[in-house]
Every structure is written in structure tokens, then in C-alpha cells.
Image (cartoon, rainbow, N blue to C red):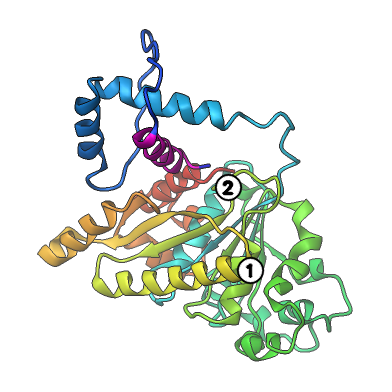
């Protein structure tokens, strides 16, 4: 369970507890987490009313919670491959840029990484120099493996980024020209939410991380991707899930609410949990005025999901995409490249 949620539950239980025992706090290490707006002041007032210090009240609440929620005696099961979808209902916010950059940084750091171009527009495939692959004739596609009509091995669809810095650890599952039919086709597939999982399952043992460049739309196509990154049985929380690039504008706030509503609906109806790994404020430039800064500040007030990085509006990413060269190969020492390495470290891989 997330420490923020656990603390909130502990404090709520403390409010109703009668005469909780005093806790020895001598020598205890300090720690911190976010609480809902107004909760610290409310809790401090309750501590004063009970005649205990704020630290003692927190110690009592957390000790009670830990006593009633002991650590499981059984070990966690073997962790599955980490699965991340870079998603936003709004287009043009940098999903492809973030997905590609983070995958490159993880591969550079020694992880085995699969990039899946799940956007029917195929920008990721084109920007990495594989646009011709999308239009090859008589080749099976990801959609065919999702709807069960494929006869061959899905490994045959993969292409490798052969730059030496990636050490043959970074592969791409390219987009295909039938991807625009995915919503229509999947509507006729039994248990369509699991279609992407069924297709990618044969690949999972070969990789440490699978990163999906999501579509700029909602619907069945997105549901299958969200279901794929759900928290599986025995998997640690906030290891797989959704990473959302946003801009510091109102349109991104609206798009985020739509995506979150779809996630919540899928979790409720499918009885699954999809973790939000965080937000990335992309292409930020404070010179664009007061409203841009206010929107950035509004994003940064969010504690769940938290803002993992603020990436400036720099030229290297655009130049690398135009040249069809991976960013970390085109400009390895740039601020953009370092931002991707820092963001990769934030993911629990």
C-alpha cells in the first residue's frame, strides 16, 4: 500500500480510538509524506485537544495501523516484467518523445527494453527510422496477434535499435497500417481487454521493461493497454502502470481528467488496479507567461499522481526526431538526454 494512503488511514482510525497507548519516540528516524489539504491542521488540533504532541499523535496512529496490518509472512511471487504505458488522451504533448527517451535511457543503463508503438499514427516507428516497416506487404501485425488470426511468431515483428550504447537491449515492435482498425476489430474479440496481454505474453520473458507509446484517444484500444499494465497478483505496487506527459495548459488538465475517468471505470468494472506512476510536464517554458506558470504550479500541487519531472522546451528532441536518430545517440550529453536518464531512475524497475 502507498505510504500516503496508509498514513491517511492510520490518522482516521486514531480519531476514533479511545486512549491509545503512549509510544516511545526517542531515537526514531524522521520521515515525511503528503496528506490531504487541511489534514495536518485538523490533526494538530486533535492532538492539542487530547493533550499529546503532534509527533506523539502520529506515532500512536502509525503504531496502531502497523499492529493491525502486519507484514505478510508469505514471500511475494516472482515479479513479472515491468509494464508502462505512456498515455494521455490529448495528442501533441510528447508521449512518443517520453516513451522513446525513457526506453533508451533504461537500455543504456543495462535493462532489456521493448518499445511498443501502440499509436495508430506510428510516429514512434517513423522517428526511430523504421517507417518503411509499417507498410510491408504480407507481414503479420500486432493486431493479428491480438485478434487471434496470426499464424507466426510475434518475435518476427521486432526490430532492433543497433546503436552500440544500447547493447542490443532495445527493440521496437513497430506500428502497422491496420492499427486504425483496432477498436472495430477488438469489438468482436472475446474478452478484448486482455487482447494485448495475450499478444505480448510470449515476449515478456525476454525483457525487463515493456514501454507502450499509447494512442491519443480513449476507447477499446486504450482499455486493452490499461488492462495490460494493471497490477498483477503478487506484483509490487507502483512498479507497472501509467506515465502521463502533460503541458502546462488547461487542455492538458481536461485531457487528464478524461483519461483518469476511463481508468477508474476500467478498474471498477474489471475489478483491477491500475497504478498511476506519475506526471511529466513536457515542453515547459516560463517565458510563455503567467498562465503557463500557474498551470505548472497546479500540476505540481498534485501528490497523486506526483510530478516526476519538468522537461524544458529544448531543440534536441525535435532535431533527433526529424533526423530519425534516437535522442541519446543524437545528443547524449544534452539536457534533454539527461532528463530522460533522470526520469528512467524514477521508475521502479
Q: Which of 26 and 150 lies nearest the eye of the viewer? A: 26
Secondary element at image label 2:
loop
Q: Quadrant of the C terminus?
A: top right
Residue 21 in percent (x, y) is at: 41, 17
Is 15 contained in the magenta span? yes
Mark carried by residue 239 = 2
Residue 79 in percent (x, y) is at: 71, 44
Q: Is residue 37 left or right of residue 22?
A: left
- Is residue 30 among what the camera can see? yes
Mark 2 or mark 1: name the one nearer the start of the chain: 2
Count numbered badges in the picture. 2
- Is residue 289 among what the camera can see? no
Image vertical order of residue 235 relative to residue 315, above or below: above
* Residue at (75% x, 77% y) in the render: 146
**Residue density around tag 2, few if under 14, some if 14–19, many if 20 or more, within 10 Å:** many
Q: Is residue 66 left or right of residue 258?
A: right
Amino acid at each position: 500500500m502507498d505510504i500516503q494512503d496508509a498514513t491517511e488511514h492510520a490518522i482516521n482510525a486514531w480519531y476514533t480510538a479511545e486512549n491509545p497507548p503512549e509510544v516511545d519516540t526517542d531515537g526514531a528516524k524522521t520521515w515525511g509524506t503528503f496528506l490531504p489539504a487541511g489534514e495536518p491542521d485538523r490533526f494538530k488540533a486533535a492532538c492539542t485537544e487530547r493533550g499529546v504532541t503532534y509527533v506523539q499523535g502520529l506515532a500512536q496512529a502509525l503504531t496502531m495501523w502497523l499492529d493491525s496490518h502486519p507484514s505478510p509472512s508469505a514471500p511475494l511471487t516472482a515479479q513479472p516484467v515491468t509494464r508502462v504505458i505512456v498515455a494521455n488522451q490529448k495528442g501533441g504533448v510528447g508521449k512518443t518523445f517520453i516513451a522513446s527517451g525513457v526506453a533508451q535511457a533504461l537500455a543504456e543503463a543495462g535493462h532489456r527494453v521493448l518499445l511498443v508503438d501502440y499509436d495508430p499514427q506510428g510516429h514512434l516507428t517513423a522517428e526511430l527510422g523504421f517507417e518503411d516497416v509499417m507498410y510491408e506487404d504480407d507481414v503479420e501485425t500486432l493486431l493479428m496477434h491480438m485478434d487471434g488470426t496470426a499464424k507466426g511468431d510475434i518475435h518476427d515483428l521486432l526490430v532492433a535499435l543497433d546503436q552500440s550504447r544500447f547493447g542490443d537491449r532495445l527493440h521496437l515492435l513497430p506500428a502497422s497500417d491496420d492499427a486504425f482498425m483496432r477498436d472495430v476489430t477488438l469489438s468482436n474479440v472475446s474478452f478484448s481487454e486482455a487482447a494485448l496481454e495475450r499478444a505480448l505474453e510470449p515476449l515478456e520473458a525476454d525483457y525487463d521493461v515493456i514501454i507502450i507509446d499509447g494512442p491519443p484517444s480513449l476507447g477499446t484500444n486504450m482499455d486493452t493497454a490499461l488492462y495490460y499494465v494493471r497490477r498483477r497478483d503478487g506484483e509490487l505496487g507502483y512498479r507497472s502502470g501509467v506515465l502521463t506527459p502533460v503541458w502546462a495548459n488547461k487542455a492538458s488538465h481536461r485531457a487528464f481528467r478524461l483519461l483518469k475517468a476511463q481508468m477508474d471505470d476500467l478498474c471498477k468494472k474489471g475489478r483491477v488496479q491500475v497504478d498511476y506512476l506519475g506526471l511529466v510536464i513536457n515542453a515547459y517554458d516560463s517565458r510563455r507567461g503567467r498562465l503557463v506558470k500557474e498551470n505548472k504550479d497546479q500540476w505540481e500541487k498534485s501528490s497523486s499522481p506526483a510530478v516526476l519531472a519538468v522537461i524544458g522546451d529544448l531543440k534536441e528532441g525535435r532535431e533527433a526526431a526529424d533526423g530519425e536518430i534516437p535522442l541519446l545517440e543524437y545528443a547524449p550529453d544534452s539536457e534533454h538526454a539527461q532528463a530522460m536518464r533522470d526520469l528512467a531512475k524514477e521508475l521502479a524497475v
